[in-house]
Image: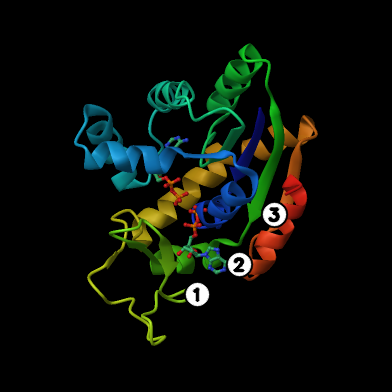
Amino acid sequence: MKNIIFLGPPGAGKGTQAKVAVERTGLTHVSTGDLFRAALREGTPLGLKAKSYMDKGELVPDDVVIDMLLERLEQPDITAGVIFDGFPRTLEQARALDETLERRGAQIAAVLLFAVEDEVLVQRISGRLTSKTTGEVYNRYFNPPRDAAGNDISDSDEYYQRPDDNEETVRNRLRVYHNQTSPLIAYYRERGVLHELDGQQEMADVTRQMLEVIGA
Ligand code: ADP
Ligand code: ADP
């Protein structure tokens, strides 16, 4: 079982690069943000609970996230290993992940830190668009969806902006990242598994660097 963590602030490109990594490695993509959004679409109590935190740009409490994650790891598609995207986000989550992997005789092979400056993140997040039918993520400024003739169709009904991708919530998410998640950088550096990527490059260049680090 090979497990890799994509660590970095909101909008750093973790989800975008995780899609490519999964195609190249056969690992399973586990995004806790996606799991919460799916729970919310289904209207489950978990989804409704998470929504109140997501709307404010706060972290969902550790016990809730950890329970959901452990349940996800029980699914049969987790065999080759996992690309963790947006988890862990606190030291408590990191310790819980270490414990559960250890119980399975597994460990973290690599942690990729996607480094991007705050002002770039705010712009990326304000332009993030998601397709209603495919879930594919685009960007109004950097990677707009196009029709067959090559026209920019960012304003079509097919694409929506996540409700938490507004400037006010984003500022709070960045504060939360710097306060609660960035201590994980030292945590994984001490374990000798941290690799820092320049997340501010063009997508294809980030991809090249990412694939090199994970050996795919
Ligand atoms: P982004 O892509 O902007 O980093 P995510 O989709 O990963 O955002 O997360 C959206 C929201 O879901 C977060 O702001 C937070 O409220 C919640 N969330 C996702 N993962 C976690 C986690 N590991 N711990 C706590 N809250 C989480
Ligand atoms: P995260 O999962 O870390 O929150 P995403 O992968 O969703 O980040 O990327 C955030 C937004 O920025 C998306 O709209 C995506 O299309 C765009 N994006 C991702 N990587 C890059 C890049 N290297 N350059 C410019 N825009 C990017």
Q: On residue 142, which mark appears?
A: 1
Q: Amino acid at mark 3?
A: Met
How many numbered circles does the render carry?
Answer: 3
Secondary structure category for the residue under label 1: loop
Q: Earlier in the sequence, mark 3 or mark 2?
A: 2
CA separation in Å, label 2 and label 1 = 9 Å
Instruction: Check mark 1 vs ligand 2: CB closer than 8 Å? yes or no.
Output: yes
Quadrant where the image shows the N terminus: top right
- Report which residue position mark 3 lands on: 210
In the image, what residue occupies the spot 49% across and 30% down? 77
CA separation in Å, label 3 and label 2 = 10 Å
- Report which residue position mark 2 lands on: 203
Residue 144 is situated, as x and y percent measured from the top left of the image, at 43, 75
Q: Earlier in the sequence, mark 3 or mark 1?
A: 1
Instruction: Check mark 2 vs ligand 2: CB closer than 8 Å? yes or no.
Output: yes
Q: On residue 111, which mark appears?
A: none
CA separation in Å, label 3 and label 1 = 19 Å
In terms of depth relative to the viewer, which is nearer, 40 or 147? 147
Hey, which residue is sitting farthest right in the picture?
Answer: 192
In terms of depth relative to the viewer, which is nearer, 27 or 193? 27
Q: Are marks 2 and 1 in contact (CB under 8 Å)?
A: yes
In the image, what residue occupies the spot 52% across and 45% down? 177
Q: Splitting the image into 4 quarters, where does residue 60 fall?
A: top left
Q: Amino acid at mark 2?
A: Met
Q: Are marks 3 and 1 in contact (CB under 8 Å)?
A: no
Quick check: 150 above or below 49? below
Q: Is residue 142 left or right of residue 156?
A: right
Q: Is residue 91 left or right of residue 216?
A: left
How crowded pointer 2 is (Cα within 10 Å; few <14, some 14-19, many 20+) is rated as some
Hey, which residue is sitting farthest left in the picture?
Answer: 43
Q: Splitting the image into 4 quarters, where does residue 27 fall?
A: top right
Quick check: 160 above or below 176? below
